[in-house]
């Protein structure tokens, strides 16, 4: 007998190429089977008319609540966003990761995995009234210590985060990224790189990133645009994708522009990963949560299956995990039940520009570890 069966939903699993009406069964915390007329089960949930997808993964969040000024509560956020895995993008650094583990990660029901910031305290000065770039001071960028902690917490750390740009690394330019890359190389981990305004230039950052590294905020508004005036993709961006750099939305409060997104999609350059960059400022708009960000990509023509791929199997691959991101039997029993709310919705970018749509993705249920968790 199965522990739980979701009955009659439209199963969409990009990793397996599935798009069919079927049941999904869970046993012992794992996916047990996908197919017609599954049962019996200790618990059955009728999801007829709704979509059943692998548990959503938000690759860029900030959930070190209480330990940083930008953190939101992970379980609360997961419930509204339909997520089963939240990847924290550098809220904690080598000096604070132990607190993040004990006080948030181990106490949360949703799965939380961190990119550790190369800067000692992580992102410590992000607030509407105070903005201090944590990558501006070389005294905080101790590569030896960062590697030591990354290795000590190797069961948890999925990568190294570095923020560079005029507001984050200042006169140090790309040097913090080079330090982070050294740490990541020694630890066998990817880097997630944030780039805001010059310096450094987009070309310099693109040239440093390796296959498997992640450029977040990939559809930013001006400056550091990824496309040319004629709409073609910048050569350094094309070259980075060709060698395996991963392009992540990372919406946030300042990193998603309609004009950029539309031109990139029109040019055939889809993001590899869709993430929210949710934090204490962006959660009340313009990012809100992952489902709103996914809806924005749907609204400009990205196909549903590709939007789901960018929030399931692709982020799982980005953090090099093979136990999630798909409903393949034997893997983690995580699933999200989705539907479209219909009506009149205005979707805003970070510049205040709005786009109207008549449908919006909404979470109708979450299965976490083979158990009905929310909905």
Image (spheres, rainbow, N blue to C red):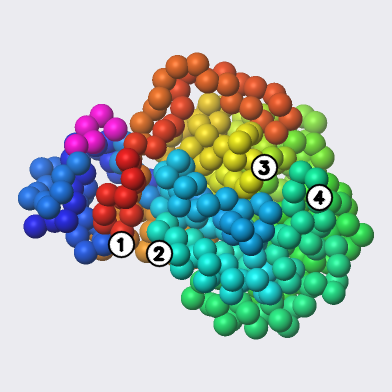
Mark 3 surroundings: few (<14), some (14-19) or many (≥20) residues within 10 A: some
The spot of residue 43 in percent (x, y) is 15, 49
Q: Quadrant of the C terminus?
A: top left
Residue at x-position 33% and y-position 54%:
368
Res 314 seen here: no
User: Which of the labelled discs sits on residue 331, or is there none?
Assistant: 1
- Residue assigned mark 3: 281
Badge 4 local density, few (<14 within 10 Å), some, or many (20+)? few
Please state, as top left, top right, bottom left or bottom right, where the N terminus lies in the image: bottom left
Q: Quadrant of residue 212?
A: bottom right
Question: In the rendered image, which residue does mark 2 sit on?
Answer: 322
Residue that appears at 49% across and 65% down: 105
Name the image quarter holding residue 50. top left
Residue with the most extreme right position: 171
| 1 vs 4, front mark | 4
Q: Say which mark, if any, is on residue 130.
A: 4
């Amino acid at each position: 007998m199965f522990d739980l069966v979701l009955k009659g939903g439209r199963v969409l699993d990009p990793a397996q190429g599935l798009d069919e009406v079927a049941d999904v069964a869970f046993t012992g915390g794992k996916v047990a089977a996908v197919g017609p007329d599954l049962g019996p089960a200790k618990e059955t949930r009728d999801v007829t008319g709704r979509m059943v997808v692998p548990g959503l993964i938000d690759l860029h969040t900030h959930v070190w609540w209480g330990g940083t000024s930008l953190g939101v509560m992970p379980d609360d956020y997961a419930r509204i966003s339909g997520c089963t895995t939240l990847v924290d993008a550098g809220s904690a650094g080598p000096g604070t990761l132990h607190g993040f583990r004990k006080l948030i990660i181990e106490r949360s029901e949703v799965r939380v995995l961190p990119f550790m910031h190369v800067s000692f305290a992580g992102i410590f000065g992000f607030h509407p009234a105070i903005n201090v770039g944590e990558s501006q001071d070389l005294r905080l960028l101790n590569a030896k210590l960062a590697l030591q902690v990354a290795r000590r917490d190797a069961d948890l750390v999925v990568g190294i985060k570095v923020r560079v740009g005029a507001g984050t690394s200042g006169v140090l330019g790309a040097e913090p990224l080079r330090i982070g890359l050294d740490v990541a190389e020694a630890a066998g981990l990817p880097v997630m790189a944030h780039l805001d305004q010059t310096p450094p230039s987009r070309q310099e950052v693109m040239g440093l990133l390796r296959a498997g590294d992640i450029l977040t905020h990939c559809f930013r508004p001006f400056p550091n645009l990824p496309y040319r005036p004629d709409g073609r993709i910048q050569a350094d961006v094309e070259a980075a994708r060709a060698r395996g750099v991963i392009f992540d939305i990372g919406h946030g409060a300042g990193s998603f522009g309609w004009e950029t997104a539309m031109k990139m999609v029109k040019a055939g350059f889809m993001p590899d990963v869709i993430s929210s960059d949710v934090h204490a400022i962006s959660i009340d708009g313009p990012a809100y949560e992952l489902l709103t960000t996914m809806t924005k990509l749907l609204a400009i023509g990205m196909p549903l299956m590709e939007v789901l791929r960018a929030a399931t199997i692709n982020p799982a691959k980005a953090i090099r995990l093979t136990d999630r991101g798909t409903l393949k039997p034997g893997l983690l029993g995580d699933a999200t039940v989705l539907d479209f709310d219909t009506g009149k919705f205005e979707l805003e970018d970070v510049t205040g520009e709005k786009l109207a749509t008549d449908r919006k993705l909404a979470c109708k249920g979450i299965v976490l570890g083979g158990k009905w968790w929310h909905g």
